Image (spheres, coloured by chain):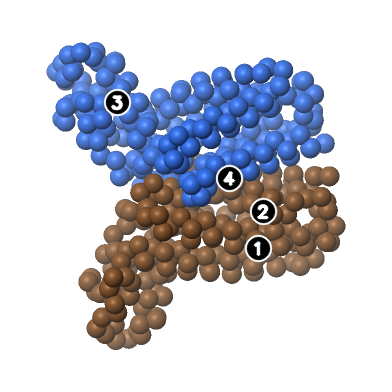
Chain colours: A brown, B blue
Amino acid sequence: MQARRGRPPNKDRNFDDTKEALLLAGMAILTERGFNTVGIDMILKRVGVPKGSFYHYFKNKDDFGLQVIARYDDYFCAKLRRCLASDPMSPLDGLAAFVSEAIEGMEKYRFTRGCLIGNFGQEMPILSEQFKQPLAQCLKHWSSLLAQNLEQAKSLGKISSTVDSTRQAEFFWIGWEGAILTAKVMQSADPMVKFSEGFIQQLTTTQ
Amino acid sequence: MQARRGRPPNKDRNFDDTKEALLLAGMAILTERGFNTVGIDMILKRVGVPKGSFYHYFKNKDDFGLQVIARYDDYFCAKLRRCLASDPMSPLDGLAAFVSEAIEGMEKYRFTRGCLIGNFGQEMPILSEQFKQPLAQCLKHWSSLLAQNLEQAKSLGKISSTVDSTRQAEFFWIGWEGAILTAKVMQSADPMVKFSEGFIQQLTTTQ
């Protein structure tokens, strides 16, 4: 375990700014490539932090990976909350807004980026045990936010009162990981459209 | 491009047997690890084929990858046909049989293996363009088999005649890729159970 050492190498940025820049670069790179194939050098280079100063900010590569996951969870939950709340009187339109934004994001990066959690998930067999819980926690946070949205839809009579919001929210995120992955395979947003439309359709026709 | 050269290095096996053994080893290893992180040496070593004789069987690593995908598609379609036909009078039980077998497989390998197509999909940004169509074709083949099964369920009155079998089959495979990936994240079959149960439930309650 390494403690913070020396001064931050870039005098124009303070410690927290540089750390945040490294985490954001990590998010961008690790939504595109696997944790094990990405070298620390690549991250440091993108941020313009000299090689060798990594341990100034993180204990080791696993610590960096775990902090990127936590930062991604914060970013994703904030985005999800914003989308879901976009029309309080029509909660399912909030889910559709999230889907539209996700499609825009995938198209913007030509289907090279995906879900950070999915990428880590593919590497679980070769990742340290300590990654398991934080990754599972992200999916729980997102399920909880979507379940609240579905409860709101129930209270407004937009979906049947018999819908199990928790179960449906879990179902959505399980399948959504597949929609992102399949969109990467197909190099097309088509699977994201088909999955989200199918999900909303079955939700609104369930009695 | 390399042509077949010399004699097969293992005198106890003929050319086709050795090639098949290499493809099967490729399937096993590439359902666990990414194509780009796996070296040819690892495959040759597992099969007991001397290093350097790879080009006797394949033009290059991409050719090997593409042939592994084709072999996996054959294997997977045969398995799917067998499961789906397990009870012709109850087609949805065939789907449940497929899910049970998939869960057994994931548990047997302690959630280290997943879907070969999903693994390649994660690597699409760094794969050659020629992988795109064969991967997409696999998903089309599986959708076609499941759609036939759903048509059979419709003709037997097990699901509503208004169900769009093609659309539902596509929906299943998109989401199933996510179920496999999320099972790897959670190191648990729970997402596979939840996704398949949710899918069958919505299918049987759709009017």
Q: Are marks 1 and 3 in contact (CB under 8 Å)?
A: no
From the top left corner, tell me how far across and down residue A76 is, in percent: 55, 64
Is label 3 in a helix, a strand or a loop? helix
Label 4: how many residues lie within 10 Å, few (<14), some (14-19) or many (20+)?
many
Instruction: Find the distance from the CA under tag 4 to the CA under tag 1.
Output: 18 Å
Is label 2 in a helix, a strand or a loop? helix
Residue identifier under label 1: A145
Q: Earlier in the sequence, mark 1 or mark 2?
A: 1
Instruction: Find the distance from the CA under tag 1 to the CA under tag 3.
Output: 46 Å
From the top left corner, tell me how far across and down residue B185 is, in percent: 48, 50
Three-letter code for the amino acid on which mark 4 is drawn = Pro
Label 3: how many residues lie within 10 Å, few (<14), some (14-19) or many (20+)?
many
Give the position of the N terminus of chain B as an image quadrant: top left
Task: Answer yes or no: is residue B201 visible.
Answer: yes
Is label 1 in a helix, a strand or a loop? helix
Q: Which is more foreground, mark 4 or mark 1?
A: 4
Rendered view: A175 above or below B143: below
Three-letter code for the amino acid on which mark 1 is drawn = Leu
Residue identifier under label 4: B191
Q: Chain ID for label 1?
A: A
**Residue B157: quarter of image:** top right
